[in-house]
Image (tube, grey):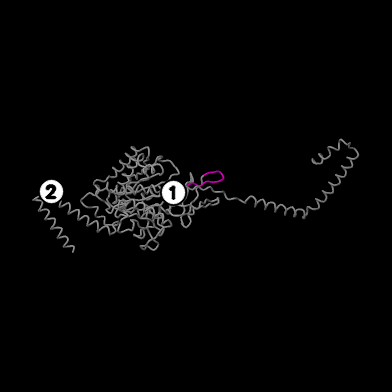
Amino acid sequence: MVMNKNMNMNLLFFLVLFASTISPSFAKGSLQKTLVASEVNKCSNASLARRLLEDESRAQTSVDLAQGYMSNADLELAIKEFGQRCSNISRIYSIGKSVNGVPLWAIEISDKPGDEETKPAFKYIGNVHGDEPVGRELLIFLANWLCDNHLKDPLATLIVENVHLHLLPSMNPDGFSLRKRGNANNIDLNRDFPDQFFFINDDEDSRQPETRAIMNWLRDIRFTASATLHGGALVANYPWDGSEDKRTKYYGCPDDDAFRFMASIYSHSHYNMSSSKEFLGGITNGAAWYPLYGGMQDWNYIHAGCFELTLEISDDKWPSAAELPILWRYNKMSMLNLVASLVKTGVHGRIYSSGDGRPLPGSITVGGINYSVRAGKTFGDYHRLLAPRDKYQVVATMPGYKSKNTTIWLDEGPVTLDFVLDPEVSHKWSVLQNVYDCNCKQEFVQFLGGAHLEVYFVLIVVLGFLFLLFQRRAKVKCSPSRQLTGPKRTVEV
C-alpha cells in the first residue's frame, strides 16, 4: 500500500514536470496543490499521534527551521526595544542565565510595574523546550498588542490596570540555538523540577540553572496563576501531570474544577482548540494524556501556590515563520482571556487584625477542597481561583487568631471578601494569678502552723500591753482638743 502511494506520487510529480515544459504557470500551480495536499495528509495523520517526543533529527534537515524566527540576540533586542517604547507600563529584568550564559529576559506589564500591590500576578513562559519556539514569538506579539491597545481596548485596559503580567519569552535559549528539545546539557527542563510522587531533583545544586531561575522567581513574586506555551499538539493541559502508580489515567488535583474552568477559558477562546477530535473540549488532564514526572506545572501548584496550565498551541512544533501571525490570531483571545480571568472570577480580599488593623499573612481555605492559598505579608491580600458555582464556604486562618468563615455565592463575577480576625484570648495571666493566690494562702497557713506561732503570740501580748498603757496615759494627761489627734497617730503606728 505504501509502495503504490509512492509510485502514484512520483508519477504525478513527473506529469507536473512534463506539463511545465508546456505551461510554467500550470506547473507552478499544480505543484503547489500537490505539496499542500501532501502536507495536509501528513498533518492529519500526525495529529492523532503523540508528537511531543518525536525524533529530533527533523531539526537537523538542510532547511533552516529558524529562518524568519528571532535569534536569541534578536529576541533580546526586541525585548529591550519594547521596554523603551512602552516604559510607562513595563519593566525589563532578567531572572537568571542559561547554561551558556544567555540572560533569561522577562517583561512585566502593569500600570505600576515593579511596585508591590494587592493585584494578582500572572506569568507566561515560552520556549521551555528548545525545539518549540512559537511561544517566544507569540509573547512578543502579546506584549506589543497590550502596549498599543491599553488605552483603547477595554480588555487590554483591564489587564494593564488590574494585573501584574510577567512574560518570559524564552526559558531555554540554548536549546533554541541548538535546535533541540533539551538545554545545553541535554536536560528536558520540564522534567527537572522536584516531584510529589518520586524523589527526583530534590538536590537543588544538581538542577539546571534555568530550573533554579524559575524556582527563585516564584520565591520573589507571588504568582496567582500562569501558563507555559508548548508545541506538538493543540490542547490545554492541567494537573496532575503524573500518577502514583505511573499508569495513564485521569488523576485530578484538589482544584480540579478550577483547573478545568481555566483550561476551558483558553480552549473556547481559541480559534479551533475546543473543536478537537482527540481531546474533548480541547482540554485534558495531564496524567490521562500521558504521565510525566518532574514537571513544572505540578511544582507550581504544590510549592508556589500558583495555578499553572501547560498549553499546546501548535500541532507543528516548528511551523514556518510565515504562519506566526496566523498562530497569534488564533491564540490572541485565549491568552488575553486567561489573564483577565484572574480578576473576572474567584474570591479576592485581605486579612486584617481586629486589634491594631495590621495586615495578616494568613491562609484561605475553601470547604471541600484540600488546598490553601497564602495571603501576602505586606498587605495581607489573597486571590483564590474558583470555578463558578452556587456557593462556597471560605475560611481564613492565622496562628494566634480565631479563624473566621463565611459562605459566598460565585455564580457571576468575582467576590471581594475581607476578613478581620480577633486575637485569641490568653488565659496565661489569670492562671498564673490563681496559682499565685493559691500558693500564698497555703504558705500563710503553713507559716502560722509552724514554729513561728510562739513568736507571734509574744508579739501580740507586747502590742496589747503597750496599747493599754497608752490608753491610761491618754485619759490622765490629754485634754479634749488633744483627743482629735488620737486616731491619726494610731494610723501612723
Decide which of 418, 169 is in the foreground and name it.
418
Query: Mark 2, residues whose alpha carbon is within 10 Å: few (<14), some, or many (≥20)?
Result: few
Q: Where in the figure is residue 282, as x and y percent of width and height? A: 33, 56
In the drawing, what numbered circle is on residue 414?
A: 1
Q: Nearer the viewer, mark 1 or mark 2?
A: 1
Mark positioned earlier in the residue sequence (1 or 2): 2
Q: Where in the figure is residue 485, as x and y percent of width and height? A: 83, 37
Left or right, 333 with respect to 384, comes to left
Q: What element carries label 2?
A: helix
In the drawing, what numbered circle is on residue 347?
A: none
Q: In which quarter of the image is residue 87?
A: top left
Residue at 24% over, 54% down? 58
Residue 236 in view here: yes
Residue at the extreme top: 481
Q: Do the residues labelled 1 and 2 touch (CB within 8 Å)?
A: no
Decide which of 457, 368 is in the foreground and name it.
368
Determine which residue is flagged by label 2: 25
Residue 304 in view here: no
Q: Where in the figure is residue 225, as x and y percent of width and height? A: 40, 50
Task: Give the amino acid at mark 2.
Answer: Ser
Q: Disc 1 and disc 2: Cα gap in Å?
A: 59 Å
Instruction: Give the quarter of the figure containing the C terminus.
Output: top right
Task: Give the amino acid at mark 1.
Answer: Pro
Q: What element carries label 1?
A: loop
Left or right, 457 with respect to 213, comes to right
Query: Mark 1, residues whose alpha carbon is within 10 Å: few (<14), some, or many (≥20)?
Result: some
The answer to whether residue 259 is magenta is no
151 vs 56: above or below? above
The answer to whether residue 357 is magenta is yes
Residue extent of the magenta highlight: 344-358
